[in-house]
Image: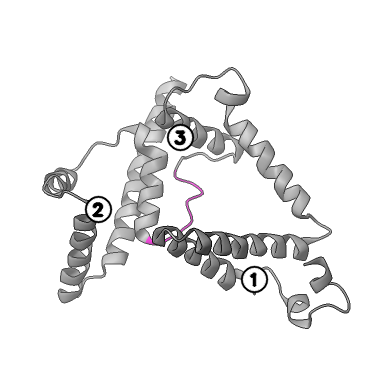
């Protein structure tokens, strides 16, 4: 990559910017997902290599502000800081405890006032909903009547395949009514974020008193 970006290298590679490579970064990430889901180890190896190329490419573009060594150093330090139960004296006996600790530490490191901050708005609604739940499940947000209905419905399913079919049918039926399933879920996520922030604010007020 250094040779490709240097004088006498490749004109196309030399012209690229962080912005121009975004579409390729997204494409390679999705191709990695496809390879993983297919179970094809050879394809997975190839696609991970393509994704790694994007990391190296961006690091080379960023020189001399930062480079691939600083990227590796940064993630190494982050892994150590986020795993005090391994590299220090903290205790976390379950994966759930580890995950909760990770999100709390990340919020403190980033100077965030809420666990909901830092979840990209551009994520697909399903991914954003899953990320929000992963970060905030320890807050025990009070279930709504919709949550009870969903729980009853899910109890009738026996596999992820059935869940996928149900989600597809929900999207189809929503479209038949002129409803936007993606937009509806995005709105639901925003409402849940507001509710979670209210809970966090109440907890902070209690601690202040």
Instruction: Give the percent coordinates (x, y) of residue 70.
Output: 76, 48
**Residue 160 has which mark?**
2
Mark 2: secondary structure = helix
Q: Nearer the viewer, mark 2 or mark 3?
A: 2
Q: Is residue 93 above or below residue 159?
A: above
Question: Quadrant location of residue 168?
Answer: bottom left
Mark 1: secondary structure = loop
Question: Quadrant location of residue 82?
Answer: top right
Tell me the colour scheme of the image: one colour
Instruction: Give the percent coordinates (x, y) of residue 127.
Output: 39, 55
Q: Residue at x 47, y 51 (%)?
A: 119
Q: Is residue 152 above or below residue 172?
A: above
Q: In the image, is residue 87 part of the stretch drawn in magenta?
A: no
Q: Residue at x 41, y 34 (%)?
A: 201
Q: Is residue 84 above or below residue 9?
A: above
Q: CA distance from mark 3 to mark 1?
A: 32 Å
Q: Which of the two labelled residues, at mark 3 and mark 1, occupies the earlier sequence position? A: 1
Q: Residue at x 32, y 47 (%)?
A: 192
Front in this rendered view, residue 181 or 163: 163
| Badge 2 vs badge 3, beta-carbon distance below 8 Å | no
Bounds of the magenta span? 116-124
**Residue 5 has which mark?**
none
Q: Nearer the viewer, mark 3 or mark 1?
A: 3
Instruction: Look at mark 1 in the image and give the residue it sits on.
Output: 19
Mark 3: secondary structure = helix
């Amino acid at each position: 990559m250094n040779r490709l970006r240097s004088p006498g290298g490749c004109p196309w590679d030399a012209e690229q910017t962080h912005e121009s490579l975004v579409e390729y970064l997204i494409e390679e990430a999705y191709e990695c997902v496809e390879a993983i889901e297919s179970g094809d180890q050879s394809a997975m190896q190839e696609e991970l290599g393509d994704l790694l190329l994007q990391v190296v490419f961006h690091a080379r573009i960023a020189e001399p502000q930062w480079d691939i060594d600083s990227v590796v150093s940064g993630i190494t330090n982050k892994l150590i800081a986020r795993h005090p139960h391994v590299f220090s004296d903290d205790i976390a006996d379950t994966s759930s405890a580890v995950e909760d600790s990770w999100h709390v530490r990340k919020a403190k490191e980033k100077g965030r006032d809420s666990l909901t901050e830092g979840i990209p708005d551009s994520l697909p609604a399903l991914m954003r909903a899953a990320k929000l739940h992963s970060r905030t499940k320890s807050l025990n947000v009070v279930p709504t009547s919709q949550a009870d209905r969903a729980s009853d419905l899910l109890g009738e399913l026996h596999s992820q395949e059935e869940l996928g079919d149900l989600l597809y049918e929900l999207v189809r039926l929503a479209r038949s009514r002129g409803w936007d399933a993606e937009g509806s879920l995005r709105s639901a996520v925003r409402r849940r974020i507001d509710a979670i922030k209210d809970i966090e604010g109440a907890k902070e007020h209690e601690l202040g008193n």
